[in-house]
Image (cartoon, rainbow, N blue to C red):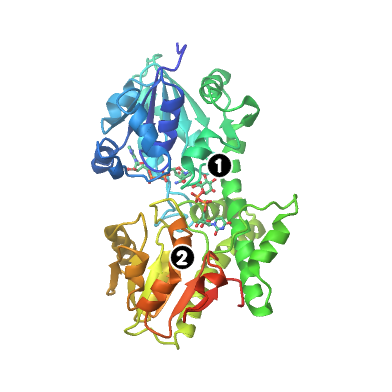
């Protein structure tokens, strides 16, 4: 019988598995934590002595890896071996939107969850706690439990040696602030029925999280809370973006409106920054999932309500592309456009669902040549994202090494990610490098009008009719 957690294994060494396990290893030095993945290159990068090669860029992550790797934190491809020696197994695999079959385009694809659950069923020994960390549809724990129990019987019908407890423990970290979010979470949510299993996980988190912030719920509330939290955050972004368009036509200033609205305690200041729409691997997929579940239960009005959040998000990207084309005399053929920022937000190298992808695609389709600079996204990643979205088209892009290189000879600069580096650009230098008439499209509202004073640059700012 399980009396203490000595070995933890996490299946999935991605943006969640890597950082979240690094923090557990850091806080619990007596627990051996191993993060496993099928992707050999990823694991080799997690193990690389050059910490600049870590597959995930997060402020503060390198330091933890340096402190704990090889002591009580390990990265491995030997999934089966690590499953067999673990007391607690986190499932932190990807749960993308289905691209075919029933629920295609909306429902979550649970093939990675299912295959890792099957592996756990096959190789786990003794009493094992299985923790869903991936974001999954409501009632997935039930599926995991069924897989674990039925596969166990197949393995050995008389076996009493394997006992599984399934818990839901969704992750709320945001990329770019993952380490501080994990160190100081707003809350830790544990959903489950088995008191002993809940207590083991509770004890791990209570090593550094104040106990009043660790809440326990039934398993389905936990699963649904995660989807709901993401949907609410995304809804706020769409709300402020819808108002940004209204500001442009009325002469109101979106930053002033956002501040005035957010100062109401009941509304709050967070997630009211206007921008080119939300990106990232989760908001869209989790809302699509919510839409699918609502329709499944016949709640079409609920589904339509959340659909509108996604529609505004896409519309915001489309309208930015149109504004750029119109300001450049309706023609982008043979024009060079500098793109500043390709990641979906600052402080991450993640480009999944980045608004930059759709906007760059639109500009390329208009005939522009793009010079893209992002402090943390490399040329290969940029090219692959664009090739993926326009497979049969010529992707005329170059990856610049600096903002100045991307401005060189360009007719326009489009700021798409709110990297700090872009706030300290010398716009006089940029002015000299660009072709006139030159436009700066500030889609993140990070520039001040004064920054461009005494330059010939034309400025367009989202939600601000200058
Ligand atoms: P990711 O794609 O970065 O990582 C998932 C990893 O799982 C991949 O490296 C993949 O190779 C691995 N994998 C898949 N099947 C496997 C198997 N059978 N055995 C071993 N490895 C396997 O994904 P992510 O961004 O870390 O997200 C993981 C989950 O966490 C998703 O459900 C997501 O919705 C959720 N989530 C993500 C974030 C975020 O900020 N990225 C935040 C909270 C929750
Ligand atoms: C989001 C949530 O914030 C996390 O709590 C959650 O765990 C995670 O999704 C997940 O489940 O994956 P993340 O997508 O990493 O985290 O980043 P956010 O800070 O939420 O930003 C998402 C997008 O919204 C970015 O493109 C960002 O630029 C945009 N955004 C955010 C705005 O345009 N305005 C804002 O005010 C805030």
Q: Residue drawn 37% across and 82% down?
A: 435
Can the viewer see residue 362? Answer: no
Question: Which residue extends farthest bottom?
Answer: 329
- Dot 1 falls on a residue whose secondary structure is loop
The quarter of the rendered structure image containing the N terminus is top left
Seen in the picture, residue 422 relative to 292 is either above or below; the reply is below
- Mark 1 Cα-neighbour bin, 10 Å: few <14, some 14–19, many ≥20: some
- Position of residue 329 measured from the top left corner of the image (x, y, whole percent): 45, 88
Q: Which residue is mark 1?
A: 138
- Mark 2 Cα-neighbour bin, 10 Å: few <14, some 14–19, many ≥20: many
Q: Earlier in the sequence, mark 1 or mark 2?
A: 1
Tell whether 80 sits left or right of 178: left
Q: In the image, is the residue at mark 2 within 8 Å of ligand 2 by its beta carbon?
A: no
**Which quarter of the picture shows residue 100?**
bottom left
The quarter of the rendered structure image containing the C terminus is bottom right
Looking at the rendered image, the disc whose residue lies closer to the viewer, 1 or 2, is 2
Q: Which mark is drawn over residue 92?
A: none
Can the viewer see residue 423? Answer: yes
Instruction: Tell me the quadrant of ligand 1.
Output: top left
- Dot 2 falls on a residue whose secondary structure is loop
Tell whether 276 sits left or right of 7: right
- Position of residue 373 measured from the top left corner of the image (x, y, whole percent): 35, 64
- Position of residue 327 measured from the top left corner of the image (x, y, whole percent): 48, 84
Q: Residue drawn 39% across and 76% down?
A: 363
- Position of residue 44 measured from the top left corner of the image (x, y, whole percent): 24, 38
Seen in the picture, residue 79 relative to 314 is either above or below; the reply is above
Q: Which residue is mark 2?
A: 416
């Amino acid at each position: 019988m399980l009396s203490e957690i000595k070995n933890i294994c996490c299946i999935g060494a991605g943006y969640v598995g890597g950082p979240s396990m690094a923090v557990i290893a850091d806080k619990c030095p007596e627990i051996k934590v191993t993060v496993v993945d099928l992707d050999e290159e990823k694991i080799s990068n997690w193990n690389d002595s050059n910490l600049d090669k870590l597959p995930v860029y997060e402020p503060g992550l390198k330091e933890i890896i340096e402190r704990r790797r090889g002591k009580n934190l390990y990265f491995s491809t030997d999934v089966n071996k690590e499953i067999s020696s673990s007391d607690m197994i986190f499932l932190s695999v990807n749960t993308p939107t289905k691209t075919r079959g029933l629920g295609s385009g909306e429902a979550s694809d649970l093939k990675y969850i299912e295959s890792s659950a099957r592996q756990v069923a096959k190789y786990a020994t003794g009493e094992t706690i299985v923790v869903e960390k991936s974001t999954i549809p409501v009632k997935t724990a039930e599926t995991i439990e069924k897989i674990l129990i039925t596969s166990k019987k197949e393995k050995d019908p008389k076996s009493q040696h394997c006992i599984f407890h399934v818990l839901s423990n969704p992750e709320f970290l945001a990329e770019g602030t993952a380490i501080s979010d994990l160190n100081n979470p707003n809350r830790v949510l544990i959903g489950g029925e088995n008191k002993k299993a809940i207590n083991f996980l509770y004890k791990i988190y209570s090593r550094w999280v104040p106990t009043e912030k660790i809440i326990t719920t039934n398993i389905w509330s936990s699963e649904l809370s995660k989807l709901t939290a993401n949907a609410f955050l995304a809804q706020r972004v769409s709300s402020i973006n819808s108002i940004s368009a209204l500001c442009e036509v009325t002469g109101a200033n979106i930053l002033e409106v956002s501040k005035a609205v957010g100062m109401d305690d009941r509304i709050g200041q967070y997630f009211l920054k206007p921008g080119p729409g939300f990106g990232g691997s989760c908001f869209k997929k989790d809302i699509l999932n919510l839409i699918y579940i609502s329709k499944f239960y016949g709640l079409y009005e609920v589904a339509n309500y959340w659909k509108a959040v996604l529609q505004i998000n896409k519309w915001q990207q489309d309208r930015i592309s149109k504004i750029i084309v119109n300001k450049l005399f309706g023609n982008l053929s043979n024009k060079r456009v500098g793109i500043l920022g390709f990641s979906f937000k600052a402080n991450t190298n993640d480009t999944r669902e980045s608004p930059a992808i759709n906007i760059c695609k639109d500009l390329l389709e208009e005939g522009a040549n793009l010079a893209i600079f992002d402090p943390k996204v490399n040329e290969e990643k940029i090219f692959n994202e664009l090739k993926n979205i326009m497979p049969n088209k010529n992707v005329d892009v170059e990856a610049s090494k600096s903002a100045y290189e991307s401005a060189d000879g360009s007719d326009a600069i489009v700021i798409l990610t709110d990297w700090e580096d872009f706030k300290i650009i010398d716009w006089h230098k940029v002015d000299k490098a660009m072709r006139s008439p030159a436009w700066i499209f500030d889609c993140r509202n990070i520039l001040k009008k004064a920054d461009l004073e005494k330059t010939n640059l034309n400025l367009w700012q989202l939600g601000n009719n200058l």
